[in-house]
Image (cartoon, rainbow, N blue to C red):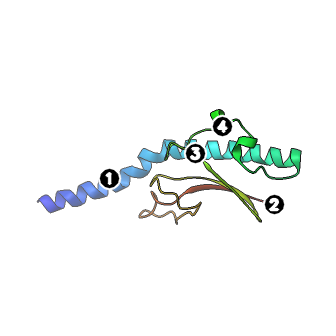
Amino acid sequence: DLPRRRVLARSSLAALLPCMTAPARAEVMRDLTCLGLNVEAHRAEHGELPRALEEVMPAQQLPLDPFGGQHYRYLHTQEGFFLYSLGPDGVDDGGKQTEDSPLHVEQGDITWRASR
């Protein structure tokens, strides 16, 4: 009977994890959208992307990633820029997302991308 309980507990926990992280995911999407719009406003005003997020907002006002407790990551590339959160697994994957499936819903970074 003990192995059956473990299987049930493990599957129940796996089903609850997305529900437990949903509020933090919503916060991340709100923050990344606001930051992304600020970056776009900077680009419109100055004709170029900022080198760092501190150019669009003072460091003390930058929101913190609920999944890492640090500032969100910002990178600009030749295609544009992207912002990302570490995501529920807390691992910096360099902005790489994993496929959203029941097995991987808690892995990978949460990203917001914009092209030129």
Question: Looking at the picture, how far across and down is residue 85, in whole percent?
Answer: 56, 51
Residue at the disc numbered 2: 116
Q: How many marks?
A: 4
Between tags 4 and 1, which lies in front? 4
Between tags 3 and 1, which lies in front? 3
> Of the residues shown, which amino acid type is indicated by label 3?
Val
Q: CA distance from mark 2 to mark 4?
A: 25 Å
Label 2 sits on a secondary structure element that is loop
Q: Do the CB atoms of the residues marked 2 and 1 lie less than 8 Å apart? A: no
Residue at the disc numbered 3: 28
Q: CA distance from mark 4 to mark 3?
A: 17 Å
The label number, if any, that marks residue 13 in the structure image: 1
First in sequence, mark 2 or 1: give its number. 1
The structure residue drawn at horizontal position 56% and vertical position 63%, both measured from the top left corner, is 97
> Of the residues shown, which amino acid type is indicated by label 2?
Arg
First in sequence, mark 2 or 3: give its number. 3
Residue at the disc numbered 4: 59
Between tags 2 and 1, which lies in front? 2
